[in-house]
Amino acid sequence: MKLSGWGRYPVVDCRVERLREREALPGLLAGHDTALARGNGRSYGDAALNPELTLSMLAMDRMLAFDAKTGLLTCEAGVMLADVLATFVPRGWFPPVVPGTKFVTVGGMIAADVHGKNHHRDGTFGAHVESLMLATANGDVQPCSRAENADLFRATLGGMGLTGVILAASFRLKPIATAFVMAETLAVRDLDETMAVFEASRDWPYSVAWLDCLARGAKLGRSLITRGTFMARRALPSQLASNPSRLPPVSKFSVPMDAPSVLLNRASISRFNELYYRWGRVRSGGRPVHFDPFFFPLDRIEAWNRLYGRRGFVQYQCVLPKAKSPTGIAALLERIAASGQGPFLTVLKLFGPAGEGLMSFPMEGYTLALDFPIRGGTLALLDGLDAITHAHGGRVYLAKDACCAPERVRQGYPQRDAFKAVRAEAVGETPRFASALSRRLAL
Ligand SMILES: Cc1cc2nc3c(=O)[nH]c(=O)nc-3n(C[C@H](O)[C@H](O)[C@H](O)COP(=O)(O)OP(=O)(O)OC[C@H]3O[C@@H](n4cnc5c(N)ncnc54)[C@H](O)[C@@H]3O)c2cc1C
């Protein structure tokens, strides 16, 4: 079938099989030189595509065990984050790290070693994984943890499915008293102030900034910073206190067709950014917000990826080391504003120290993420952004990437050779698990 990531670029013809139980894996792998596990396809580019054999993990969706004393959940890799939330929020538990959508699988979160709005305090999802079961070469299953097959464990966190098929994992949930977050939004004038507010917000568990990417000159980097913390029961206003762990209503909005590309022009995007900033300024201050819109605002609109039109889009996400971030992020924003190809939403986050995954994306510094609809000139612009990122010692996020050059990934991920060595030992010199991304980037 024709398959793509969430950005709908590129589209690749893939043979797709559904894995229903681990015993079926050797039979599915037999006769294929390469294979790749796929979760819910929420990576943006070509990370979850293998033309020869793409294994859908969505039927491996059983929760296996939960320890209510420690919060340790063991589940199959195809379990969706949305199901973990629906099951455990009413019982007072929340995942340690969540990305910006709940429609991802546990296997996908481990393979991309996802980060959330709390990276500066809690690290990546992988930091909270105790152990996992990994099927390698012929379907042989290896238990991996910090104590057992530790190198393979580190290579699998952020390994983009290239070390094998994650069948199941155990990770720790954290206790919450209510489903509500006290969220505070601050309107900030420029990039220096944005970074200063991030630093001053270190004690807030969650923080994120929306940037007006078309603002230039003295307004470059102006933003709305939102920071939040889960609320205690006694802090809830009376109208929320009767059901403090409620789940959100199911979304009713959907984008029915591809948006015409004419809607996405400099004037409409500039207007949107201006209005959004003003709206944020008016609403600044603190208020209780349900966790669902706080963490997953885009999930409320089904198939929002169609808004970027038939040709799809690329999300560019990079991270720059802290010391280089002020100049590097300013250079990226200037380049984007000058191109006139500004995206609707530009997000900036502060990362804490890098974790243990050999190919994990985060490093201590600032990460910028923005969407670009595919049109003439987009790939050249992205190449220009890559050049700035790498000149400042940064790297791009493989779960979002669709077009970075292999030498830039080689420079940006210094543990790439160690990763390749562990992978070769586990699955043999000839890559057994491969993707369109791993071929493009010579991983
Ligand atoms: C709206 C939106 C917001 C997002 N926000 C964030 C964010 O804030 N932070 C962040 O880090 N990411 C974010 N992402 C990216 C997303 O979290 C990751 O791409 C995640 O990996 C997607 O999970 P998935 O189950 O859809 O995996 P897929 O996209 O299907 O696969 C992603 C990778 O995981 C591998 N994989 C999947 N399952 C397995 C398995 N069982 N065994 C081995 N390998 C496997 C695949 O081979 C592939 O390389 C966002 C994505 C969207 C669409």
Image: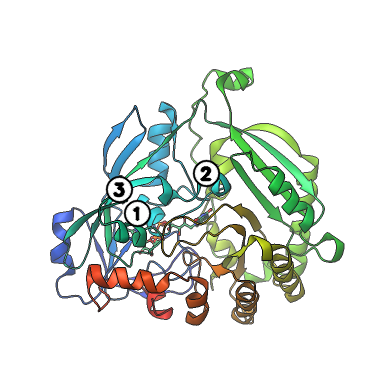
- Position in image of residue 423 (x %, y %): 29, 69
Callout 2 crowding tier (Cα within 10 Å): few <14, some 14–19, many ≥20: few
Circle count: 3
**Sequence-wise, which precedes: disc 1 or disc 2?**
1
User: Which residue is disc 1 drawn over?
Assistant: 107
Q: Are the residues tagged 1 and 2 within 8 Å (C-beta)?
A: no
The residue singled out by tag 3 in the image is 131
Q: Is residue 119 above or below residue 434?
A: above
Residue type (three-letter) at the residue carrying disc 3: Ser
Does mark 1's beta carbon lie closer than 8 Å to ligand 1? yes
Residue 426's image quarter? bottom left
Which element is circle 3 on?
Answer: strand
Task: Tell me the CA gap for discs 1 and 3.
Answer: 12 Å
Can residue 338 be seen in the rendering of this structure? yes
Residue 276 visible: no
Indicate the quadrant of ligand 1 in the picture: bottom left
Classify mark 1: helix, strand or loop: helix
Q: Is residue 317 left or right of residue 44?
A: right
Residue type at mark 1 is Gly
Which three-letter amino acid code belongs to the residue tagged 2? Answer: Lys
Residue at x 53% of width, y 61% of height? 305
Q: Which residue is mark 2?
A: 252
1 and 3 marks in contact (CB < 8 Å): no
